[in-house]
Structure formats: structure tokens, C-alpha cells
Image (tube, rainbow, N blue to C red):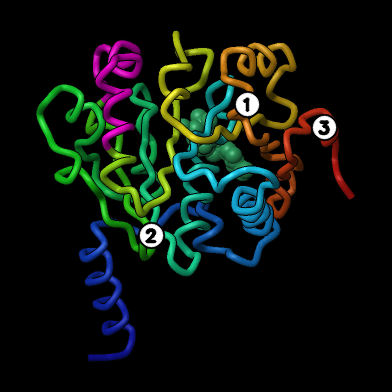
Amino acid sequence: MDLWKTLEKQEEDYFKEAAVTGRLDDHLYMYHMPYSYTAEQIRKLRTFIFHMPDREVPRVIMITSALPAEGKTIIASNLAISIAKGEDQYVLLVECDLRKPSMFNLFKYPPSKGVVDILEGNANVSDCLIKTPIDKLTILPAAKEAPVNPSELLESKSMKSLIKEVSERYSDRFIIIDTPPIQATVDPKILASQVDAIVMVSRYRYTKEADFKMAMESLPKEKVIGTVLNALDELPAKKYKYNKYGYHKYYGREG
Ligand SMILES: Nc1ncnc2c1ncn2[C@@H]1O[C@H](COP(=O)(O)OP(=O)(O)O)[C@@H](O)[C@H]1O
Ligand SMILES: [Mg+2]
């Protein structure tokens, strides 16, 4: 067998083992380009989370934003990879945007049962976990298909208890929760009440100040530990800038 074939075979076996169906998406900068500027910004966010003055390291962290397409899923996923790359840190990435499951696009697993099936009583948490090619990173997907009643499910008591159950059962892991946009959520406080910390995402030249403020007002302020200003620069190398809750200060190009 020539070398090329051997490598292809190895890659196939590897995909099979990790339950992925192809190359992970390029937006997973922490995986594909750990030394890029963007990955560096994600690492800064991680470092910040681990070294907040006067605060315990939060273990259950929710990533949210006012509007769709601001980068919640991309940031939650990259942050999860970055934490899982730490020495002893295990991470469970939970996809709670039930209306628009998209994590399978990034991590390339087939559409899989998850949060919706658990809430509907048709699956257990452990049946739904997806192993990723990143050591120590497991995903709990949203659903195979978007449910007919995503808001009711998301805002139900059982959602609240699911997050509680997951964080108690996997008490040795960081739990990163990717959420739907706040504007599409009737009561973001239900999810927020179950987490230790909230990271807000906003997108450069996209998020309006009024939307951001409205979203902030619907969250418990003491839990919001910071804001990520995503896609700060259109240059591919400079997609993220992280700033400790200083949304306005970085509203411009840097450097
Ligand atoms: N930093 C970024 N660099 C490049 N593309 C981005 C970035 N952030 C978001 N995008 C693009 O925007 C789309 C929406 O991002 P996503 O994380 O799915 O947003 P949300 O979860 O907030 O709806 C992605 O598919 C991606 O193409
Ligand atoms: Mg999303």
C-alpha cells in the first residue's frame, strides 16, 4: 500500500472513531489554527475566565447574544476546544439553540438526537453524547431536527432541570452552553438561572446598541462576566477581540 493510501485509511479510521463524517469546519480556529490571531483571542477569553479577580472559576458558562448570526456557536465551540486543550479539563458543549441546530456543521457529526429528545422523554443524556476528535471534548447536540415548539421546550421547567442534571452528573467538567439569540427567547432568565457565568457576543458593524442593551437588561447582570466583540475586522486573521465587559471601548478597528 502506498503512503497516500495508508494516510487516507488512517484518516478514515480516525473519523470513524470520533464519529465525524469529514474534516472539521474551518471556523474551528482553535483546532485548525491554534497559533492564529483569532485563536489567541479565544485563549485570552479562556485565561480571563480562569483568572477573574474575586471570583471562583465558573464551571457552567452560557454563551449568548441579542441576535442570530453574531457568532455564538462559533465562539462557544472554539472556547470549548480551548478549555479542553488544557491539561486536565474536560468539557461538555451543550447546544441549546433548539430552533436552529448548527453544531453538526462545525464538528461534522451526522444530525443526532439530543436535548430535544431528552426533554421529550425519548432519550437519556448518555445516549446522546457525541465524542469529538478533540480529546476531552464531548457534545450534547440540540436535536436531529428542529422541534415544532422550540421556545416552549427551551423555556420549560424540564430544560432548567436538564442543565442542573447535566452539571451535577458531569461535575468534573466545564459545561459550555450555546444558546439561541435573546431576542428570540421569551424568558432568557430560565437558562441564565442555571449557569455560573454568561459571556455576551456581539458582532462588529452588525449588532445595534439598542439590541445589545435590551439583551443585557434581560439577563442577570452579576452573571455577565464579559463581552466578545466578534468579527472586529474583516481581515480573516482578525476576527475576534475580547474585552472584559467593555463593549463600547473596542468599537472600532484596532491597530
Ligand atoms: N469570527 C468569524 N469569522 C468568520 N465568520 C464568522 C465569524 N463569526 C461568525 N461568522 C459567520 O457567521 C455565521 C453565524 O455564526 P454562528 O456562530 O452560527 O452565529 P450564531 O450562533 O450567533 O447564530 C457563521 O456560519 C459564520 O459563517
Ligand atoms: Mg448558533
- The residue indicated by pointer 3 is 251
- The residue indicated by pointer 1 is 222
The location of residue 150, given as percent across then percent down, is 31, 16
Single out the mark in the foreground, 3 or 2: 3
Residue at image coords 60%, 53%: 50
Residue 38 seen in render: no
Three-letter amino acid code at the position of disc 2? Arg
Counting other residues with Cα less than 10 Å from the Cα at mark 2, is it few (<14), some (14-19), or many (20 or more)? few
Residue at image coords 70%, 36%: 229
Q: Which mark is residue 23?
A: 2
Three-letter amino acid code at the position of disc 3? Tyr
Residue at image coords 58%, 65%: 34
Which of pointers 1 and 3 lies earlier in the amino acid sequence? 1
Q: Secondary structure at mark 1?
A: helix
Q: Are marks 3 and 2 in contact (CB under 8 Å)?
A: no
Q: Quick one: which residue is furthest to the left in this view? A: 122
- Cα separation between marks 3 and 2: 34 Å
The location of residue 226, given as percent across then percent down, is 67, 36
- Span shown in magenta: 146-165
Q: Secondary structure at mark 3?
A: loop
Q: Quick one: which residue is furthest to the front in this view? A: 54
Quick one: 31 or 188, which is closer to the camera?
A: 188
Q: Quick one: which residue is furthest to the right in this view? A: 255
Three-letter amino acid code at the position of disc 1? Glu
